[in-house]
Image: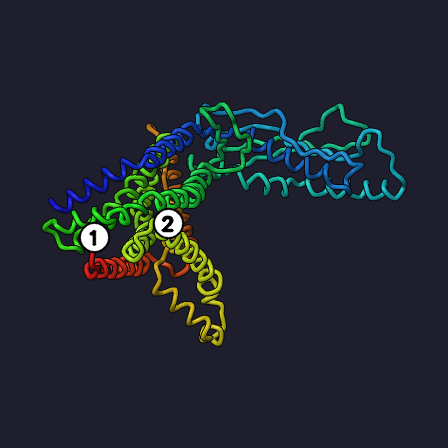
Amino acid sequence: MKFLAVLRDSLRETLDVKLFYVMVGLSVLVLVGVGSVSYNPVSVERFVTFQSGMINQLIRADPNAAKLHVRLDYENFKRLDDRTEPWLGEYDFDYVIEFGLREGQVINPLEKEQLDKARKDLKKAFDDTTMLQRQLEQLFKKVEIKKVPPSEKLPPDTEQSRFHVTTRGTRIQNRLDWFHEPALFFGAVPIRIPLFSLGGIVHFIGDKIIGGFGAAFVIFVSIIIPASFLPSMLNKGTVDMLLVKPMYRPQIFTYKFLGGLLFMFINAAVIMVGLWAVLGARTGVWLNSLLVCIFVYTLQFAIFYVLSALMAVLTRSTLVCIMISFMAWGLLFAMGWAHWLFIEKERTNASEETRNHWAFVGFDVLYSITPRYKDLDWLTGKIIEEDLARPRGEPLAAGADEEDRKAHELREKRAREMYEEQLKKIETKYGSYNWATSLTVTGVWIVLVLAFSCWLFHMKDY
């Protein structure tokens, strides 16, 4: 009951700080913003024509092709089935390659010879359709190509190759891997770049925006707001009233410290539960790893808040508490990146002489006994990536025949194999950092600093 009473007082103190409501308001605005984004699957026609358009622009921008007319395009695009998902559809279209002079251009004999040679090489390359088959099979699962006569009306001195193509499904079998175009503010501001998969967009939001900028902003604000809790408790008059209560001094200090952590926990819970629900409802991808971030961000905040608590006992100054917390934040951030770049990343490739050098060993040892702020960041990104890589197969359609069932089983098997490969890549990407070591070292460090602060508080004469 004593613990709950102190927590209640800390919560009341938290709610008395008007900035707390500003923080909650900003969190709600972020949730509304994320919830207003719609994710529209790109049609196959839109995707392939966008790609060909980019290739044509690059060709036109090349100074060596200033006088040439080169066009790669898809024409007469038709859908042959009535499925709703674009990545499962069957399509029929013409693939067109044109090569010649731009209208009004004059060339000398040497340029004409080079143009004729390029035209012959292009015709030879596409006559057997091998190159085109290989190109289209990067996206489509089954491709049938037949060469057809070119258009009757062509620009002067231009040659055209035209191929009639029929496809049966794409190599992508689920929504998460298919290309989507986000639209902001409930579709009012579309972002027309059909190059990113839904999984890639969700990963960018979850890892880069939420796990990077979002986490840093939450910790930044959370360092400032509760920094005054402990110094104000230790002010003359307030501390006198607390010390006459039937509680041990270390109990009072620890409970007050936990009350400060409650502030961060509430902030993190509001934003992360909200983002989990909003992203899941809008994309169909329920990232349970986002809920783990609530506890990770609270632990990261505890690293700096325990230093703030120590400074409160030593100085009773809110300003000093804030300054020391930010200095520790910057130091641990720099140490984390330095350890990754110069130690962890090079650990397997470095020579024995380098690994045994005093600087290498010394920094590695120093890092091993300090709180793992950046490790926790990276490990959070790791579980988000693993969550996104998890197979989300689509159920077998009702009334499917034996051939469809076998194809479905094959897709499920390939998805599991790809998942295993992705997990291996993710493990390699994040080196030897692991949850057990990071949580143990960070937790022990927090407990030791808190115990030292409690001892100082117990020994001080107020």
Viewer-proximal residue among 205 and 92: 205
| Residue type at tag 1 | Thr
Above or below for 339 versus 416? below
Which quadrant holds the C terminus? bottom left
The image quarter containing residue 38 is: top left
Which quadrant holds the N terminus? top left
At a point 73% along the width and 35% down the height, the residue shown is 70
Viewer-proximal residue among 405 and 111: 111
Position of residue 392 measured from the top left corner of the image (x, y, whole percent)? 36, 39
At a point 27% along the width and 49% down the height, the residue shown is 230
In the rendered image, which residue does mark 1 sit on? Answer: 254
Position of residue 14 measured from the top left corner of the image (x, y, whole percent)? 27, 39
Above or below for 147 versus 453? above
In the rendered image, which residue does mark 2 sit on? Answer: 319
Q: Nearer the viewer, mark 2 or mark 1?
A: 2
| Residue type at tag 2 | Leu
The answer to whether residue 94 shows anywhere in this view is yes
